[in-house]
Image (tube, helix red, strand yellow):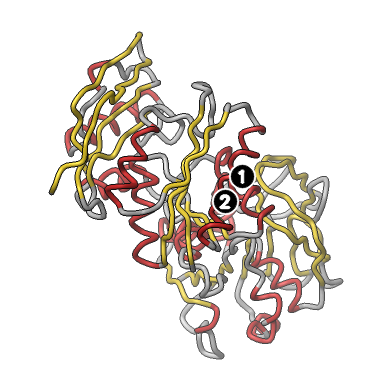
Amino acid sequence: MILVVDMNSKKNPFGLQEFVLPIFSIAEEIEKSAVKHYLELNATSLNGYDKVILSGSALKDTTTFNQTNLFAWLKDCDKPVLGICAGMQTIGLVFGGCVKKCREIGMTSIATCKQNILFSSTFEVYVLHNYALVPPVEFDVLAESANCVHGIKHKHKDVYGVLFHPEVRNIEVVKRFIRTF
Amino acid sequence: MRLGVLFSGGKDSTLALHKAVEKAEVVCLITLVSENKESYMFHTPNIDITTLQAEALGLPLIQKVTAGEPEEELKDLEAAITQAVNDFKIEGVVTGAVESVYQAARIQQTCNNLGVWCLNPLWKKNQKALLEETMTIGFKTIISGVFAYPLDKKWLGRQIDEAVIEQLVALGDEYGFSPSGEGGEIETTVLDAPLFMKRIEVLGSNVKAQGNSGVFSIKQARLMEK
């Protein structure tokens, strides 16, 4: 069973509709799935789930950047995790990385720089962010655009992050993550 | 959150408005009237009817004319949103974007420049389900433009009902177009909806069509008690 975590600030009335349910729909087609908001997560929240996807959030929403303590569970998590945009940035921050200003909005090209289970070669993606992640040392870089890192994987865990939004034009990336684990 | 809705008068922006009203405070509508029939951003048949729709909805309308030149029209959009920020203190803009990354990205960019939220309640929703939702909740929507094979003039002016949805979905599957017109294959005009305090009655119209491209233009209309 897949847990899709809503990473949107409660201030956004449509974060769930715009950034979470599109991922949930892709996941639910393959495997039974559920949605929880990140503020609802606690030590036992992941029980019963075998993989976790952290959603993206709106351009103006960087709320989770200052709440990384609520994601400390990621460090001990032995389940496969995929973070999307804000999800990836939050994973990076939890593991000691940092964010830097980098705006990309719309379709752009990214190139794979390390073989991985999510994607290969150079391809077009939809991007929507004001910040990029400077990945922590424990992570390998999987893909980059001309401006920033777009894919990461923990060196020893099945913890992945993509900065682009695969639910928009690259749903196969989400499907590969689900089907691999 | 105080919101302005980017409003073309078609089914998607009207549905986005209905969803926004359920969750936040909608304080104005924002309409770009494009003079360029080829514009991918804003061109919509019967855009002038938004004046009557806004009156029916009891919402103030910011209407800006744009020449509709690519990228230049974004400056007009920025000016319209800026006016909504100044006059109505909006904190966010709601759009009816479903699939088009071309439109969505440009509106996101514009809102980001102005520091306002860009909210897309219909984003990536199933297009047939959206068509059905507009019908189920009581929209009276007519097809006011067709721009894709094999759609032709006999579709113009038709009200969207169950049979029309089934036919559009079947044709969309067969000929590879979006059944809800997300790629501009179909344009629509909403004449009544639950939030309308009055309905729109069309008194005069004409149809201009050639092959698989045509427009149903409302020439005269009025508000009627419901």
Q: Which mark is residue B35?
A: none
Is A79 placed left or right of A111 in the picture?
Answer: left
Q: Nearer the viewer, residue A143 or A78?
A: A143
Q: Residues within 10 Å of mark 2 (few under 14, many from 20)?
A: some
- What amino acid type is highlighted by mark number 2? Gln
Q: Nearer the viewer, residue B57 or A77?
A: B57
Question: Considering the numbered disc 1 on the image, is that residue within a helix, a strand or a loop?
Answer: helix
Expressed as whole percent of the image width and height from the top left, the position of residue A116 reads 72, 54
Is A118 placed left or right of A14 in the picture?
Answer: right
Expressed as whole percent of the image width and height from the top left, the position of residue A66 reads 70, 80
Q: Residue at x 57, y 57 (%)?
A: B85
Q: Residue furthest front?
A: B87
Dot 1 and dot 2 residues touching (CB under 8 Å): yes
Name the image quarter holding residue B151: top left
Is B38 placed left or right of A62 in the picture?
Answer: left
Q: Label 1 belongs to which residue?
A: B79
Q: Label 2 belongs to which residue?
A: B83
Expressed as whole percent of the image width and height from the top left, the position of residue B163 reads 17, 34
Q: Residue at x 60, y 75 (%)?
A: A79
Name the image quarter holding residue B207: top left
Q: Residues within 10 Å of mark 1 (few under 14, many from 20)?
A: some
- What amino acid type is highlighted by mark number 1? Ala
Instruction: Identify the subunit bearing mark 2.
Output: B
Q: Nearer the viewer, residue A141 or A14?
A: A14
What is the CA distance from the residue labelled 1 to the residue labelled 2? 6 Å
